[in-house]
Amino acid sequence: MKEKIRNAVLQSGADVCGFAGAEGFNQAPDGFQPCSIFPDCKSVVVFGIALPRGLYEVDSRFIYSHYNSLACPQVDHIALQTAKLIEDRFEARAVPLPCDSPYEYWDEEKLEGRGLISMKHAACLAGLGTMGKNTLLLNKEFGNRLVVGCVLTDLETEPDEPAVSICPDSCSLCIENCPQGSIKEGFVEQKPCRQYSYGKTKRGFETVECNRCRTVCPMRFGVKRGKGKV
């Protein structure tokens, strides 16, 4: 059952897929756990699509912004298809979650938002990677390029094994290169990050003005491809 779901997710266009148990989210804040959304949740299917490496090499930030945004509905589509597959083939219940927005929690003063659950933490619990010092998900094969989605289900599956961290202990490039000083080890202040990172062109198209924490990371392309130019 588990491998049938994984194979279907990968065939739908995902680059990675893993499984986490709902109980693994007990350390998440109240209201941001899978069972807060779907009380009968037993397992979480987590998957990701990797952005092209070339997007990290261009200065034109609206290109990166456009295709990062385009990946989100693709991830949501895979989540919907996966939920339907689980319900149709295994006679279970499944709840797909938006990979990015919409979400309800917003602190206007801190410019701090929270998704329904933390996709990064879900990916870590499903064995898809670990978090770097900049809190970005790091995957051994795809680095920090994954856009992550998930599906909650009342199917009970065995969680995948945790991944081994690929973040170099002695590296602090993301911290040193943050223009706003927003990155503390293991924590990011969202307000100064958001204020600096997002903008618009003269015509009003949205842009990502800064993604330095991604592009300076020596593991941005994963272990095998991490030695590319910064």
Image: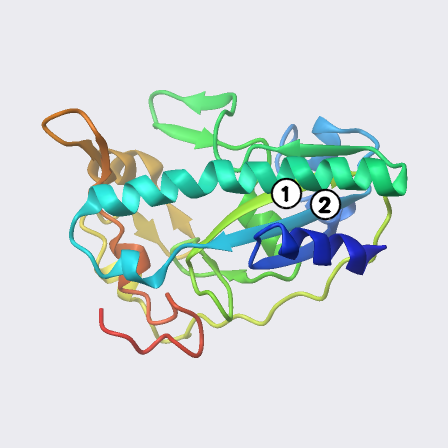
Q: How is the image coloured?
A: rainbow
In the rendered image, residue 16, in percent from the top left (x then y), is placed at 59, 59
Q: Residues within 10 Å of mark 1 (few under 14, many from 20)?
A: many
Residue for point 62% across, 33% down: 97
In the rendered image, residue 93, in percent from the top left (x then y), is placed at 83, 33
Q: Vertical placement of 110 versus 18: above or below?
A: above
In the rendered image, residue 82, in percent from the top left (x then y), is placed at 70, 42
Q: Of 180 and 115, which appears nearest the observer?
A: 115
In the rendered image, residue 198, in percent from the top left (x then y), is placed at 24, 35
Point out which mark residue 44 bears. 2
Residue type at mark 2: give it: Val
Q: Of 36 and 198, which appears nearest the observer?
A: 198
- In the displayed structure image, the side of residue 91 where residue 198 appears, left or right: left
* Residue 154 in sight in this render: no
Circle 1 SS class: strand
- In the displayed structure image, the side of residue 29 where residue 193 appears, left or right: left
**How many angstroms separate mark 2 from mark 1 (CA)?**
7 Å
- In the displayed structure image, the side of residue 156 where residue 14 appears, left or right: left
Q: Vertical placement of 192 versus 21: above or below?
A: above
Q: Check contact, mark 2 vs mark 1: CB within 8 A.
A: yes
Q: How many marks?
A: 2
Residue for point 56% across, 37% down: 76
Q: Of 150 and 133, which appears nearest the observer?
A: 150
| Residue placed under numbered mark 1 in the picture | 150
Residue for point 42% across, 74% down: 169
Quadrant of the image containing the N terminus: bottom right
Q: Vertical placement of 44 versus 34: above or below?
A: below
Q: Vertical placement of 50 versus 70: above or below?
A: below
Q: Of 214 and 172, which appears nearest the observer?
A: 214
Residue for point 88% across, 42% down: 90
